[in-house]
Image: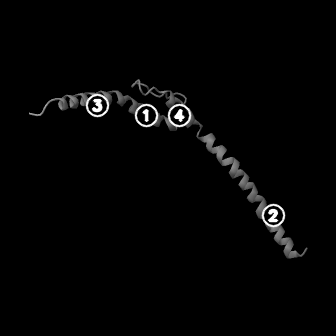
Amino acid sequence: MSLYQLIFVVGQITIGVPALILLLVTLVGVPWVTKWSLRSLGTLTDRLNKVDFEARGGVVNETGLPKELLRVVREINLALNRLPPGSRKQNAFSSTQLTNCARPLP
């Protein structure tokens, strides 16, 4: 083996081995870290699935969630609290329009 071939093989090894290590870390580590960092969203999703939207009064429990999600939960709770008045207004409007449509035009 000549000196040039030896330098070429050593160069490929010094580039190839770290590249394989980085590939392994990327393929295994990135999905694991992503799943680990988003675990609190799974907790929030479970709590949102337990809310009864038909009851028109449910709220999401804020205890035990990280502070990054508390603002989201508060905004969701505000939106859920606005549902009953909005539903009443919509029903009143619909019944008024139904009454107006039932009257004959003069």
Which residue has dot 3 on it? Answer: 90
Judging by the rendered image, the residue that carries numbered circle 2 is 13
Q: What residue sits right under mark 4 in the picture?
A: 45
Query: To which residue does mark 1 refer?
Result: 76
Where's residue 66, x and y in %? Answer: 54, 35
Give the CA distance from mark 4 to mark 2.
47 Å
Write down the quadrant of residue 74 in the picture: top left
What residue type is disc 1 on?
Answer: Ile
Give amino acid for label 3.
Gln
**Whole-percent x, y for residue 75 in the image:** 42, 35
CB within 8 Å, label 3 to label 1: no
Front disc: 4 or 3 = 3
Q: CA distance from mark 3 to mark 2?
A: 71 Å
Q: Residue furthest right?
A: 1
Q: Secondary structure at mark 3?
A: helix
Q: Earlier in the sequence, mark 1 or mark 4?
A: 4
> Marks 4 and 2: which is nearer the front?
4
Mark 3–mark 1 distance (CA, rounded to whole Å): 21 Å
Contact between labelled residues 4 and 1, with CB atoms less than 8 Å apart: no
Q: Tag 3: Cα neighbours inside 10 Å, few (<14), some, or many (≥20)?
A: few
Task: Specify which label sits upstream in the sequence, 3 or 2.
Answer: 2
| CB within 8 Å, label 4 to label 2 | no
Q: Which mark is residue 55?
A: none
**What's the colour scheme?**
one colour
Q: Secondary structure at mark 2?
A: helix
